[in-house]
Amino acid sequence: MDQSLSPDSMQSSAPVTGRDLRRIRANPDFWYPVAWSRELKPGKTIGTRYAGQPIALVRPREGGSVFALEDRCAHRQVPLSKGTVKGESVQCCYHGWAYGRSGRCIDVPYLGKGKLPNGVRTYPVREVDGLIFVFPGDPAKAETTPFPRLAEVANPAYKTRRFGQLVHCHYSFMHENLMDMNHQFMHMKQMGQMKPRFLGQERGPGLVEARYSFARTGGKQPIGEALIFGQKRDNSEKFAHRDVMTIRTTYPYQTLHIQTGDNAPVMDLWIAYVPQDEAELTNRVFGLLSIKRPGIPGILDLAWPFLTAFTERIFREDREIVELEQNAWYEQGGDRNQEIFPVICNLRELLVECGLPAGQDAPAPVARGASPA
């Protein structure tokens, strides 16, 4: 249902349902990216995290698929990510205990085969389009939980940039930042003076969507924007409010695409914010930014460094502002935001509905080493 921004709708928002949004935990019953494929070399293991859970990713040298285990040896709790990959197993660096992809302990060098202890937790894992995903929640739900569409990574008509880094804030600040395009005021130095027009919103089960158009009221078009649209534009009425930007939170992911009329999107963004610490006040961003190739072959590849620099400057400003918001939350002892934008009020409600209240336990993990080797 569409809802425009009218004076009657400009009401301050108290904390949603009386809860502090910044204490709402992400729901683990979804597929979350935890590493880029390029980070995990054949025959190696690396350590990653989801909301305080240490996870070891293992890539067998012989070309087997990646598997994911709790990053703690059952013996002395030493990280398995510090160990050595042997065939389809990983061997702890301390006493040589070895674990297969099921999490079961399959070898203790100084014990007989009949005396092997229990193993460690294992996680469902998928590797798609250069990202490694794990399912940190109830493993029984993994096969029936929809897997996200990852921008236009597999479409040869687009070129995709992979980006992201650690951001020291609760993931909800990131959702709000991208959804609320009124913050273009902050990007004036990079983008020029842009006037957004809110076209409406949609609220459905598990999703909130906002639509905008823009007009440039001052400054020149940056090179990075010209590369995205495939053309140079001035500040005339000809280009004002010509394109529609659609931003959607389909929990727990966000997407953004820009298109003109019924044409294919010129830009398609998929992004995920993965909690790192147990309190979920730090997140790692994984973003896939797909740009449609213009009609001149090879020109986007040549200009790619300029677009990369442009998007990095925008992301840097966003990161700085959400970390300032997080610092204010620390100083004030809670969420005191006075929200007036209807789509952000709906977004806040969505994040509470889909997330887990502070103190609520995540689904119990599977028994250690209980599945077949």
Image (cartoon, rainbow, N blue to C red):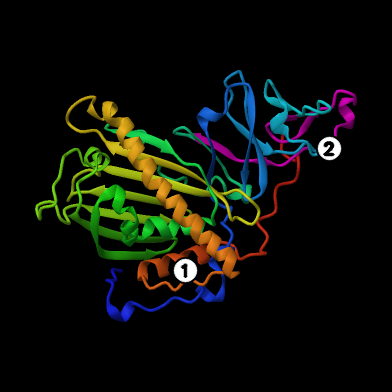
**Residue position for label 2:** 76
In the image, which residues are magenta?
Answer: 99-127
Q: What is the spatial separation of the Cα atoms under label 2 and label 1, in whole angstroms?
A: 43 Å
Viewer-closest of 69 and 181: 181
The residue that appears at 42% across and 72% down in the rendered structure is 339
Between 282 and 270, the one lying in front of the other is 282
Three-letter amino acid code at the position of disc 2: Arg
- Let me know if residue 278 is in the magenta part: no
Q: What residue do we see at 24% from left, 51% from top?
A: 192
- Of callouts 2 and 1, which one flags the residue occurring earlier in the amino acid sequence? 2
Residue 328 x/y as whole percent: 53, 64
Q: Position of residue 161 (x, y in %)?
A: 38, 35
Q: Can residue 208 be spotted in the picture?
A: yes
Rendering quarter of residue 78? top right
- The location of residue 18, given as percent across then percent down, is 55, 76
Which sits in the foreground, 90 or 320? 320
Q: Which mark is residue 107?
A: none
| 297 to 21, vertically: above or below | above
Residue depicted at 71% across the width and 27% down the height: 90
Residue 94: x and y, percent? 81, 28
User: Which residue is the site of mark 1?
Assistant: 349
Residue at 86%, 26% in the rendered image: 113
The quarter of the picture where the C terminus appears is top right
Query: Which amino acid lies under the numbered mark 1 shown in the image of this protein?
Result: Glu
Helix or strand or loop: what does disc 1 sit on?
helix
Could you tell me which quadrant the N terminus lies in?
Answer: bottom left
Left or right: 340 as drawn, with respect to 81: left
